[in-house]
Image: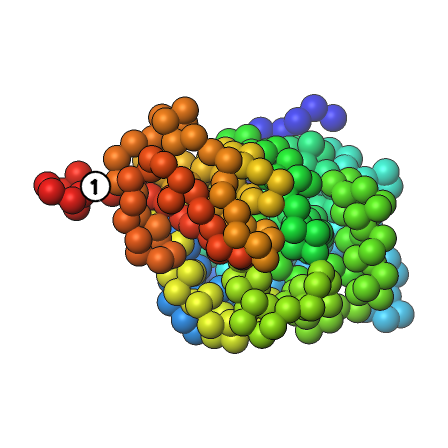
Amino acid sequence: MSPCKCSDPYALLTLLYGADEGRTAGETLRRMLPASSAPAAGGLTEASLALSAPPQSGLKENELLIHDVDLLSSPPGQPAPDYHSSEHLLAVTKSLLEDVQRGARLIRLKNISRAWGDPPHQPQNVLILGFLRAALLLANPNALAVAELEAPLAVRAPYFGNGENAAHLIETGELPWLLLDAFARGKSGSLQAWVNALRLPITAISYLHRLTWPNAASASLAAEVLSAEQITPLQTVLNLSDEQAPSFLTALTATGEALSPQLARRRALATHAALLSLTGLPALDSDPDDLPGLAAMLRARAASPAFSPWGAQVGLPCGDDCLGLMRIAPDGAMALCLTNLSVEPQTAALDAAALGFSGEWQDLLSGEVLALDGEEWRRLAGYQSHWWVAMPLQYRKGI
């Protein structure tokens, strides 16, 4: 089956099930849809997803805003799902339409890569994803389809489609492992390499990054980006099972060296600064108000155009102990993000002149304004982060 560029749900039903069954399924879909849909809220922005102010400063997993749908689950006593028949796909669609009409905004589609059966990643899975996205948008143009994929970055590309016929967002499940490894060892190598490879193939889609407890189900995905020598100590310390612990912060506390309460808080903030600097949308599994300083960090990110969910990301390797990257928005706004992954002070190995940067820049996290020359702007205390943005001419000193 060749890749499909179609985003019409009725045409996708025909591609999946043939003309006759597709036509009958399409008539059923029409009867499911509401007489009128919610008004469109515009493009995907962090403000539109309640990321701008506490206590709604994160995508909360215990709220309807993010709704999980396991495409391979079935009620007790019921047969396993079979998407080779349109009947089951329409039953799932009916449930999803009810969810979005009640206010669900992000629909996380679990096991989409195996919906058509084994082997995973068959082209029919992308057609099912495109159909569910199109059906959701007919009911609520503000709904977003999220593909949860236990697959390396290179395998995820088909699930983006052409920006209109597959996922709005693709979830990255390996990030918690990478962050735990980086902060446990105080070394950025594996995390920096992954960040360098994290690119958006087109600007109409983005990533969803979650900070959650790394359970046993995600261990195989971690093995794609970390060595056995890096994963095994984490597995031993966390005593992994398929049940999730209360939060990512619990996992962070269990790994690495024991720290004073103040340093533990700074390490937790640095972990979130690394998360929030990435291209895409962040999802938190705990209340931002439980970590002093996080709500302000979320507001700073949401207020800066450089952190557009559609923006580009360029990795900036800056030493074994630091994570560096540049965020570039579609309108050209930029933010230079640095995070010290260790408890010791570090100086990021970057040259502003070689990068083409000059003039005065402001750190969104501290408010400090500095010229990007010398070493001061590159210095980071233990677990400190900088988000440098260029100062407009009218706000620079002496102007």
Above/below status of 9 relative to 316? below
- Image point 35% across, 58% down: which residue? 366
| Residue 274 as seen in the image, left or right of residue 184 | left
- Image point 81% across, 64% down: which residue? 237
| Residue 245 as seen in the image, left or right of residue 304 | right
| Residue 146 as seen in the image, left or right of residue 380 | right
Secondary element under disc 1, as helix, strand or loop, is loop
- Image point 36% across, 36% down: which residue? 374
Q: Position of residue 24 (x, y in %)?
A: 67, 46
Q: Position of residue 131 (x, y in %)?
A: 62, 44
Pointer 1: residues within 10 angstroms few (<14), some, or many (20+)? Answer: few
The answer to whether residue 212 is seen in the rendering is yes
Q: Position of residue 140 (x, y in %)?
A: 47, 56
Q: Quadrant of residue 263?
A: bottom right
Which residue type carries mark 1? Pro
In front here: 9 or 353? 353
Colour scheme of the rendered structure? rainbow
Task: In the displayed orientation, state which residue is furthest to the left.
Answer: 399
- Image point 79% across, 57% down: which residue? 234
Which quarter of the figure is the N terminus placed in? top right
In front here: 351 or 338? 351
Q: Position of residue 238 (x, y in %)?
A: 80, 65
Q: Quadrant of residue 365?
A: bottom left
Question: Where is mark 1, residue-wise?
Answer: 392
The answer to whether residue 179 is seen in the rendering is no
In front here: 175 or 377? 377
